[in-house]
Amino acid sequence: MNFNSFEEILDFAIEREKQAVSFYRQLADKETFSASKQTLAEFVEEEKKHQVLIEEFKKGNRSVVEYDYEWIPDIKRSDYFVDMKYEPGMDFTEILRLAMKREEKALRLYNVLATKTDDADCIKLFKVLAQEEAKHKQMFETLYDDHMARLGD
């Protein structure tokens, strides 16, 4: 990833969040189980918040980096799964695995983007977004564990 400007970094991040919104919307639209559908719809809204956060930051609203950091434990479930592509008809277990990997990659991306700028506020923004993605990853890993427990695994 090579960027020529601060704006290019932000535009890249905005585009990634738009892709995440689209991804979770597609999953939610195709999911038939109502609880799963609701969970995925909530992630659509979460990713929209990230998109707006970056867009507001790009417009000059630096207050978005005022954030209380907290330690998010890494359950590391996604470390044991290979990358997957969405295919219609995937069961909920596979969807959770796919979502975990996606959030893991987003977390890594924001940590990398934080190294691509020397703007202190931009670095804070990417650390905020990394923490948010860590929360999402943890949520999907916890959902996965709970789901597997219900299945008797």
Image (tube, helix red, strand yellow):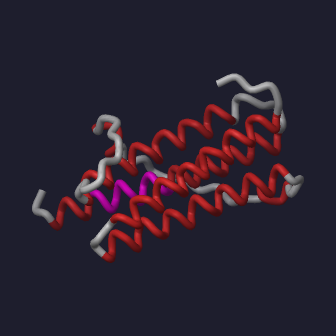
List the single residue furthest toward the right. 60
List the single residue furthest toward the top. 2
Above or below, 50 against 29 in this view is above
Front position in the image: 136 or 87: 87
The residue at 43%/59% (across/down) is 26
Magenta stretch, overall SS:
helix
Please identify the quadrant where the C terminus is shown.
bottom left
Coordinates of residue 135 in the picture (x, y in percent): 50, 56
Please identify the quadrant where the N terminus is shown.
top right
Above or below, 77 against 64 in this view is above
Q: Is residue 55 left or right of residue 62?
A: left
Coordinates of residue 116 in the picture (x, y in percent): 72, 28
Above or below, 109 against 53 in this view is above
Coordinates of residue 114 in the picture (x, y in percent): 69, 35
Front position in the image: 89 or 4: 89
In the rendered image, residue 36 lying in the magenta stretch gets the answer no
Q: Is residue 70 left or right of residue 96?
A: right
The residue at 33%/69% (across/down) is 36
> Which residues lie in the magenta part?
135-144
The residue at 54%/37% (across/down) is 108
